[in-house]
Structure formats: C-alpha cells, structure tokens
Amino acid sequence: MNVYSESPSLAPSLASSPSPSPSASVSSARSLGSRAATRRTVLRGLGAATAAGTAAVCLPAAAAHAAPGAAPGATADTTPGTAGTHALTLVHLGRDGAPTTAYRTLLTALSGPDAGSGREVKDSPSTVTLQVPAGRYMLDSTFSTRPVGEGDWGNDWLVRPRLDIDRDTTLVLDARVARPVDVRPPFADAVFEQAGLFAEVTYEGVTGFANLMTRSLDLRVAHLGPDAERGAVRTWADSYWKRPAGVCALGYLFRGERALTGLVRRPAPGDLATLVVRAGVPASGAGTVMGLVDFTPSPGPSPAVPLAVPFGGTGTFHFTAERGTWDLVYSVPSETEGPSNSHFVLGRSYTPGSTTVHTFDTPVHGPALDSSPGARPVAQRTGDTLDLTVPLLADGDGHVPSAPPFTASTVTLHRNGALLATRRGETPGHASFTLPAGRASYRLTASATRPRGSVTATWTFTSAATATATELPLSAVRFGADLALDGTAPAHTPTRVAVTVQGAARRAGVRSLTVSVSTDGGATWTPAPLAAGRIELTTPAPGRTVSLRAELTDRDGNTLTQTHRDAYVTRAATGAR
C-alpha cells in the first residue's frame, strides 16, 4: 500500500469545517482527437456556475458519497473492487490541519478503463475511500475557509497532475501546503472582481482539465506529487479587476511538468498593453443605449469580466500581453427579439506598453475583404455554383457585423448582359447562384439600404465552370473618414478621406481608380483627385450628407463600381467629437 502525505503534519484535530464556499469548478477529460465544447459554451457554463454560487460542476462526473448518516472519518465506496481495482483513500485537512468536510475533490482518469471520465467527491466525511481501476489520474482538490468577519470565502487549490494507481493508496490532501496567489494591477482605483486558476494535463493522448474560479482575493494553490512528463502540464491564472470605465485583465500562462505553487505578480503600467474601445452611435438611434465588450484570452477558458460601453463613449482594458493572443467581441443587443449584432476581432497579439484603438459602428459602412492568410474567399465558384459572402456593411474600421441592420437587400447577376437571377432580403452581400458551364462575362451587383444611407457594389469579371473551388476576382474600396462617434463630420470644413484598395486589385495591381463626391444625395457627382491615398473635400452645411463613389479597374481588366449614398452626415462645427 502506498501512503502519500502532502502535509507538514499528520496530527490533525477533530475540529469540523464549514461547507464549501461559493466558488465554481469544472473538471473534464477528453481525447485529443475529439472536439470539445465550443469555447464560448464553456465560458457561459463557468460564468453561470459562479453567478449562481454553485459549489462545483463536473463534466462528466460520477459522485462518490459516504453512506447516509456516516460519521466524520468514515469511508465511501469501500466495497471490494473487481480484479484490477484498488482502494484510493483521500484524507482532507484544512488550513488549521484539522480534518475538514469543506472540500471538493475531482479525480480525472487519464489512462486505464475509465480514461476520459471523472469522479467528484464533495459533501462527504474528511476521509473517503474510492475503488478505482489501475491507471494514471489527475487529481485536484479545493478547500474552503470561512472568513473572519464579512467577506468572501477563502480557497486553497491542490493539484496533482500525476497520480499513478497500481495498488491500494492513501493520499493526504493538506491545505496548509498551498501558497498565496497575489496578482494585482498597478492602479489604486482598481477593484477586484474574480479570478480563475486552470490546469490541463495530457497523457497518452488524453487531456484532463480542472479549474477553480473565485470572487475572493484569499486564494492559494500548490502542486502535489511527482513531476509529470516534460511539457505535459499547462497552467494559467487569470485575475480581473474593474476600474471606472475599464477592466484590468491580468493573465499568466505556464507550461512544464508541474502545476503552480503560489504566484505573485505586480506588473508596472509599462508591463501592460492597453486596448481602447470606442462605441459608435447606431444609426437607428433609439432603443439600446450601450454596447457590451467581451475581451478574453484566446487560449483556454477564462472568467473574463464584460464591460458595458455607452454609445458615444469609450472603455479601456489594461492587460498582460504574455497571456497569449486575445479575442475581442463587441455586441449590440437587438431592439427586437433577433440576435445581437456582434463584431469580432479574434486571435490578436499585443505588445507590452502598446495602445490599440478599435472604433465600432461608425461610418463609412461598406464592403471589407479579409486579406489575412487562410481567409475564406468572399466569392468563389465550384463547378457551376457561385457562392457570395461579401460583408457589404462593415463599419468604418472594417469590423464585420454578424447581424447588420438593414431595411432592404438585393443581389443580382447578369451573364453576357442578360439578367440571370435576383436574390432579395438575405444578409447583405450574401447569395448563391447556379451558372451555365461555359465561359462568359458576368456583372454582379450587391446593394443594401441601411437606416441611414445605402451601399451598392457592382463587379464585372469572366468565369467558366471549375473543377475545384476557385476564388472570383472581386475588389473593394475602403473610405476612412475622420468622424465623431455619432457618425458626423463638422460642416463647412476642409477634410481628408483615406482611400484603400482590397481584394483582387490589391494582389494584381490597379490599372485605374477614380473617386467622386456628392453633397446632394447622389444627384450630382464631382471628381475628387486622389493623391497619396487620400481625397480632399469640403463638407456641406449642417444636416447635409456626403456621398462617395469609387470606380476601379484592376490590371486583369476586372472592374468595380462602389457607391455610398449618404455615407455620413454633417453637424454644426462646434459639435462634440
């Protein structure tokens, strides 16, 4: 029989301990070849558990409890096992060294017949015996400590990434070996919100996962047992703090053979990256008055704190760049029963000391083509099928909305000058067509009317049936106007508008590009000379609009005519920025 002690003392008293604190935990094991639940589903589950004050959640889990009425120190599941099983006795000691029932222990099988499953033990005596098959396990145990006076409960988290069971074994789990987790931002006005500790262990193709989430600063952690294999343990710690109009997100990621034993981090302001989110005022105006920002690390789940940003206002995140890449989701709740309109900025890396600004929902709204490596083409032909997924109403920063507000949407396709088909009412810029096989000249037009203004893009190109998915040579022109968060520009003011080219013309080269401006809703157009990637114009009187048009031909002869009617509105020159 093996006896493992993770205790500085084996002379406990018989004092009882309170029930577990309002912390949340998830433990699971999975094969590396299978797909886990989506990251956002996991986050919603974690958030719900914390908000509800749930003591523990286990996915999947088989609970082990003492028999009804068992006295402290009794055992559970002590029936002799079948061949190949062994008795695992767990002794739980609190911070005072006394036996405690204020714990939650999770045993995750990484090998053996139960590989990929987990057991949870809670609400049981301080000493519990389980019958388990031989194999490799990951064990983690959370102890709760009643605070002195008012406040949240303290938590001690013990993690044993490697527990090999090949005989009857007794394991003493002693909260006294845990060491403090002290992660704080360098801002006096920051108020602690919540923290999460996570451990992930991989062994023979199976990955076990466990975590502790808490709203208490009284948090301690320790590694138990021998080292796991090289690089088999990935751990991370995230701590979130609220500030006026902002959030501090302090996260640290580690990989090695051991879990954490304590963690102290006191970053200076220059150690943090800064993200500023500017919330534009939607054209619809009424209804919802703010957007919601989720800013979370890409690798692994995190108990992130969302930030509400009023329309026309800003929110700021200070965060640790070394946590890895980060995901930003800006959402505007629907004014009806439809889905929220969300904008995604995913998998971005940042540099300590840098400041990044994202502005959402301001003009000029129009097509945006993703040129990043591996991006899916927005128009492609496979055999005789043309699929179009142009984001026709991206905002002025190029963020693509998931549910853009529009009042009308049309896509038409002409072949050799004759109308082939029309699609109406679908997501702007989205359609599918079946084409004749022969080579022909096509004119594709996508248009959308917004609560304020409209966008139309017309492309010409030649195409024939293809053996494999083939990208079609579509281009887009982006107009970058200097506008306030309500989407307006000062009246009677000379201004410059940046003009950039995306898509096929950026790759193949531009043969010609002309830009025109209208200040009467598109009734008349005036050429605007293009110099150094910009045009110059003088804005009209207050309450009038500026419309923009681009006509482009790439070096292969494909063309684009793109029109933004009432792209943005003017205001009195003294208006707020």
Image: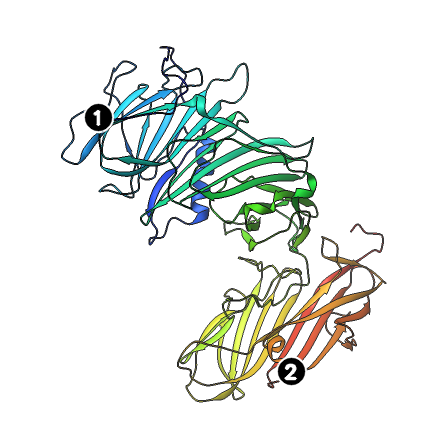
Q: Compare marks 2 and 1 and give the one earlier in the sequence.
A: 1
Point out residue 156 in the picture as x, y percentages from the top left corner: 45, 26
Point out residue 120 in the picture as x, y percentages from the top left corner: 32, 31
The disc label shown at residue 398, or none: none
Q: How many numbered callouts?
A: 2
The residue type indicated by label 1 comes to Asp
Q: Secondary structure at mark 1?
A: loop
Residue pointed to by mark 1: 77
- In percent of the image, x 37 and y 44: which residue is there? 229
Instruction: Specify the quadrant of the image occupied by residue 363.
Output: bottom right
- In percent of the image, x 66 and y 43: which residue is there? 271
Residue pointed to by mark 2: 553
Q: From where the camera sits, is residue 496 visible?
A: yes
Point out residue 19 in the picture as x, y percentages from the top left corner: 40, 19
In front: label 2 or label 1: 1
The residue type indicated by label 2 comes to Thr
In this rendering, position of residue 496 left or right of residue 467: right
